[in-house]
Amino acid sequence: MKASIVLSTHAASLTAVAFKGDFEANVTKIAHYGYDGVELAIRDPNLIDPDALLSVLSAHGLSVPAIGTGQAWGEEGLSFTDPDEGVREAAIRRVCDHIPFAARTGAVIIIGLLRGIVKPGITHDQAMAWLVEALQHCSSAAAPHGVRLVLEPINRYETTLINRIAECMELIDVVGADNFGLLPDTFHMNIEEPSIAESLRRAGPRIYHVHVADSNRWYPGAGHIDFGEVVSTLRDIGYGGTISVEAMPMPDADTCAIESIKTLRPLLGTKTRRT
Ligand code: LER
Ligand code: MN
């Protein structure tokens, strides 16, 4: 298993992103702290220069295991479940626009807050039907490029759609695409799941990416989640992907990154050198 940390390519209002702003300076620090990769939070892929980003990343030997899309919801209000058809279509287009860079980097595309919420006047069934339609569309568009998508169960205080792993597993069955899986986030799981280990076991091979933060959304080690159990459970179920730190920059971004890797590295094993 590898370790990454979330880095936004632009200034962002998302609170659980430790690094934003000067891309090269942040990448340099993250590599120096001992991470294998960076999860890139990208509001709009049309605003990035993929060649420039990749040249900085490869100079520092960092991979891109995942692309986060939530800023399109946070900053622009795009979602798969908005009552306005134009907004739903724009959200689908936005996800499809991420496919070329995801194909180049091998990143999974994360559907977190971009799924939306059940808006007033809309039934839960209607929102779910729009969600399934959007996920089927995006998964089919991504499949020929070898790109995978993941939906992240998010706690009840942030969305009314898919809070728990079990709900996401049902959704995965309904969507019916091999390149569509699940992203568990320990912060959300600590709120919603009776047992984090048991829910990870239930999700098994459909886990394509993992987010970690402690119970207080600070760095792993700052709260009461048992990361030894999280990592050993992931190992037991054969997870060989990346564990990505998505935590608040508390007490500051650098301490968050340093403390996170201090907790995770002994659990994950030595950093594998990229050649
Ligand atoms: C996104 O990965 C997430 O976990 C949400 O809570 C956004 O903050
Ligand atoms: Mn998350």
Image: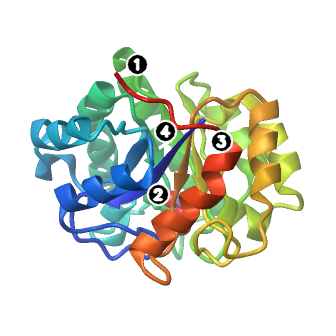
Towards the viewer: 181 or 63:
63
* Quadrant of residue 56 within the rendered picture: top left
Real-space CA distance between mark 4 and mark 2, rounded to the nearest whole angstrom: 11 Å
Q: Quadrant of the C terminus?
A: top left
* Circle nearer the N terminus (3, 4): 4
Would you name the residue on which mark 1 appears?
A: 146
* Circle nearer the N terminus (1, 2): 2
| Of labels 4 and 1, the one closer to you | 1
* Circle nearer the N terminus (2, 3): 2
In the shown orientation, is residue 253 left or right of residue 207?
A: left
Whether residue 153 is visible: no
Looking at the rendered structure, which numbered label has been put on residue 135? Answer: 4
Q: Residue furthest bottom?
A: 251
Q: Residues within 10 Å of mark 1 (few under 14, many from 20)?
A: some
Give residue 58's position: percent from left, percent from top: 24, 34
Towards the viewer: 155 or 266:
266
